Image (cartoon, rainbow, N blue to C red):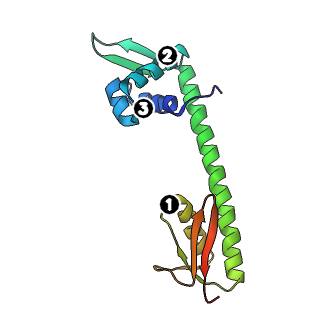
Amino acid sequence: MTEMKQHEYALLNEIAQDSMVTQANLSDRLGIAVGSVNWYIKRLITRGWVKVSHLDRTRLKYDLTPAGMRVFTQRAVLYARDSLKVYGDYRKKAKNLVKDLKQAGIRQVYLEGEDEVVDILRLTCLEAGLQISDSPGKCVIGVNGTNYEIKNTEGK
């Protein structure tokens, strides 16, 4: 697959959802300058991924070509595959941590943070029968980079 910049993929996604979208709307939605939107669209047209039709003097319609749809779909599949791999990696780390905690006799934990990575740990703890505390206590766990980290294990 041809390497694509994130903005190009985002433009393909927006055009796939609304072929009547304007460059100004694309600029607002993606948080990039209208001039950049225009430049990226020209690249997409040159690559044969988008075609443009004039509806009237000031209005354009953008459509994904079959090649554009193929690239868009491939990118979506790769994103899903990579996301599942990341999820699987965090899930494995969470299961190993929970196993170690249970072997150490810890039955209640406080999870520091509110993101998807902590949600994976929360699910794993609940499945393993660990209680999730509402306030920091004997065992506090957080995320450090791409790993889970026990920050406190008082009174083990």
Quarter of the image with the C terminus in it: bottom right
Taking depth in this image into account, of 13 and 65 the one nearest to the observer is 13
Eye-nearest disc, 3 or 1: 1
Q: Secondary structure at mark 1?
A: loop
Percent x, y for residue 46? 53, 14
10 Å crowding of disc 2: few (<14), some (14-19), many (20+): some
Residue 107, given in percent of the width and then of the height, sits at 61, 84
State the SS at label 3: helix
Q: Which mark is residue 14?
A: 3
Q: Is residue 22 visible?
A: no
Residue drawn at x 65%, y 67% is 94
**Residue at image mark 2:** 45
| Three-letter code, disc 1 | Asp
Q: Secondary structure at mark 2?
A: helix
- The residue singled out by tag 1 in the image is 115
State left or right for residue 118 relative to residue 1: left
153 up-or-down from 124: above or below: below
Q: Tell me whether circle 2 and circle 1 mark residues in contact (CB < 8 Å).
A: no
- Residue 84 in percent (x, y) is at 63, 50
Q: Type of residue at label 2?
A: Ile
The residue under the point 52% across, 83% down is: 137
Disc 3 marks which amino acid? Answer: Glu
Q: Residue at x 30, y 16 (%)?
A: 59
Query: Do tag 3 and tag 1 residues touch (Cβ < 8 Å)?
Result: no
> Which is nearer the N-term, disc 3 or disc 2?
3
